[in-house]
Image (cartoon, grey):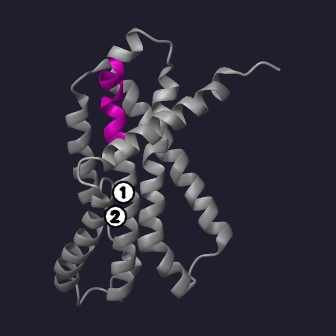
Amino acid sequence: MPPTENTRNWPLALLLSRLALTRAFRPSGLGPLWNTIGIAFAVASVGLLFGTILRRQLVSFDAYIRQLTAGLVLWAFLSAVVGESSIAFARWMPILRHSSISLSTIALSVFLRHLPVLALNMGFFLLPQYLLLGQLSAALQLAASILLLANVAWLGTAAMVLGARFRDIGQLIANLLQVTFLLTPIREDDLAD
């Protein structure tokens, strides 16, 4: 059985994502670890600021910090994939003109490049919470992870298509992601009546 287009994409997409991840570590040695440091700083600063402001309204400050941490980890992954996807076509244009690399290979490589950073952040921030508290079952965690990855994949692909049509949309998408993050609500069951 001859390989299909989709099966031929995986090795090249893995190679491209590995090269991009290696290149990210080269300048400072920390590379994507800056993302983890940024999340820790954001949890500390935003958690203390809004936790102090909302202290009388929060049912549990610890639950607020846990949910803030989980939200920041997942939002960092989503915004990294969607933001990079929106400029990927323009970045890869010189190579696309002179090779037969498909757009799906580039979209897959962008997605795969950010998976190790997501795994690092989840292992550093979220895994200890779930091990200590045992809040979610393994089946529920797996289903939620698959749903998250599927949503990020289609959002990244949509951003890539928009970026291919409108070259400067990357800046608009970055600003929209930032505003959308600020508009995400605090769950009502965390607030006291």
- Please say whether residue 81 is visible from this viewpoint: no
User: Which residues lie in the magenta part?
Assistant: 82-93
Q: Nearer the viewer, residue 90 or 141?
A: 90
Residue most extreme to the top: 98
Q: Name the side, left or right, on which 56 lies relative to 154.
A: left
Is 9 magenta? The answer is no
Q: Position of residue 108 (x, y in %)?
A: 51, 35
Q: Nearer the viewer, residue 26 or 164?
A: 26
**Helix, strand or loop under label 1:** helix
Q: Amino acid at mark 1?
A: Trp
Q: Which residue is mark 1?
A: 75
What residue is drawn where x is 21% and y is 73%? 46
Q: Position of residue 140 (x, y in %)?
A: 63, 67
Q: Amino acid at mark 2?
A: Leu
What residue is drawn where x is 20% and y is 81%? 48
Report if the CB atoms under discs 2 and 1 are less than 8 Å apart: yes
- Please say whether residue 128 is visible from this viewpoint: yes
Is 85 magenta? The answer is yes
Q: Position of residue 157 (x, y in %)?
A: 45, 33
- Distance Cα–Cα, label 2 vs label 1: 5 Å
Q: Position of residue 50 (x, y in %)?
A: 20, 77
Q: Quadrant of residue 47?
A: bottom left
Which disc, if any, is residue 72?
2
